Image: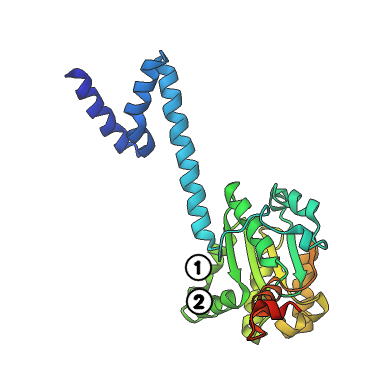
């Protein structure tokens, strides 16, 4: 009877202390420790370790959810053989996240469909797993959000949220020209991040053509100066994965006589 009372009280205290894993696992671990003749301190150690492991897992899941990645990508799933221009040793080194500690940036430059977003996402997910706060934005979406925040007079709050990040990913710079206001707001984000927050940028434009997006040579020069001061540049050259896949899938349909005729 006293054992049951002790168990009830223990669970009550664990719940009040907000230790959910210890609450759910205490009886199971206690039974295992009794079978293995583990002393009380050993039991407590196992219980605490399980709580810490689950807490780290939950925190990592929250960071991934908050980062808002478009999909889950890893460096292991990237086809480096199809992209020999990509510096694989550098990418592997970047997964250690030391560039984030040093407030360095990463610029992924190349044609559309060459894996830039894949690599940026993989680096972001790895950073999340190592405890860093990350946010993924498509540039057009970020500019839209900044302009809306300005209209709603909550721009300062949004900028404060961005300033708390360890890594900011700006995807697809160059696909849509920004308005004058949009370019200024984007530059303000880049300027604020300078030497405070690491930034990853993916772009299909050479640096000489960034003014096509930002619209102003002076603004472009200032943005590039901040982003390239301490950065790693990864070139992604070659044909588009998506174009290759589309051609491969269309090829059997070119002839009404079927795949055999299309191979001749």
Cα distance, mark 2 to mark 1?
9 Å
Residue at image mark 2? 149
How dense is the environment of label 2, judged by Cα within 10 Å: few (below 14), some, or many (20 and up)?
A: some
* Residue 75, x across and y down, in percent: 68, 54
What kind of element bears circle 1? helix
Residue found at x 68% / y 74%: 248
Q: Nearer the viewer, residue 77 or 130?
A: 77
* Residue 73, x across and y down, in percent: 61, 58
Q: Nearer the viewer, residue 87 or 223?
A: 87
* Residue 26, x across and y down, in percent: 34, 29
Outermost residue toward the left in this view: 1
Q: Nearer the viewer, residue 261 or 2?
A: 261
Residue at image mark 1? 157
Going by the image, does 24 lie left or right of 120?
A: left
Q: Quadrant of the N terminus?
A: top left
The quarter of the picture where residue 176 lies is: bottom right
Q: Quadrant of the C terminus?
A: bottom right
The quarter of the picture where residue 180 lies is: bottom right
How dense is the environment of label 1, judged by Cα within 10 Å: few (below 14), some, or many (20 and up)?
A: few
């Amino acid at each position: 009877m006293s054992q049951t009372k002790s168990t009830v009280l223990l669970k009550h205290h664990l719940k009040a202390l907000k230790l959910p894993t210890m609450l759910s696992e205490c009886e199971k671990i206690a039974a295992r420790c009794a079978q293995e003749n583990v002393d009380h301190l050993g039991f407590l150690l196992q219980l605490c370790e399980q709580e810490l492991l689950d807490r780290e897992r939950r925190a990592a899941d929250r960071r991934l959810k908050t980062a808002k990645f478009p999909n889950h990508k890893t460096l292991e799933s990237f086809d480096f053989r199809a992209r020999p221009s990509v510096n694989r040793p550098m990418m592997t080194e970047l997964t250690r996240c030391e560039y984030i500690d040093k407030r360095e940036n990463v610029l992924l430059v190349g044609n559309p469909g060459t894996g830039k977003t894949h690599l940026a996402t993989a680096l972001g997910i790895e950073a999340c797993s190592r405890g860093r706060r990350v946010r993924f934005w498509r540039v057009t979406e970020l500019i839209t959000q900044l302009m809306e925040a300005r209209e709603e007079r909550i721009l300062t709050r949004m900028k404060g949220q961005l300033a708390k990040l360890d890594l900011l990913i700006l995807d697809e710079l160059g696909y849509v020209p920004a308005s004058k206001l949009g370019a200024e707001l984007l530059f303000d984000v880049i300027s604020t991040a300078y030497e405070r927050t690491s930034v990853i940028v993916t772009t299909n434009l050479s640096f000489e053509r960034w003014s096509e997006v930002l619209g102003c040579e002076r603004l472009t020069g200032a943005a590039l100066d901040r982003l390239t001061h301490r950065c790693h540049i990864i070139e992604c050259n070659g044909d588009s994965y998506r174009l290759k896949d589309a051609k491969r899938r269309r090829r059997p349909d070119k002839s009404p006589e079927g795949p055999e005729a299309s191979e001749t």
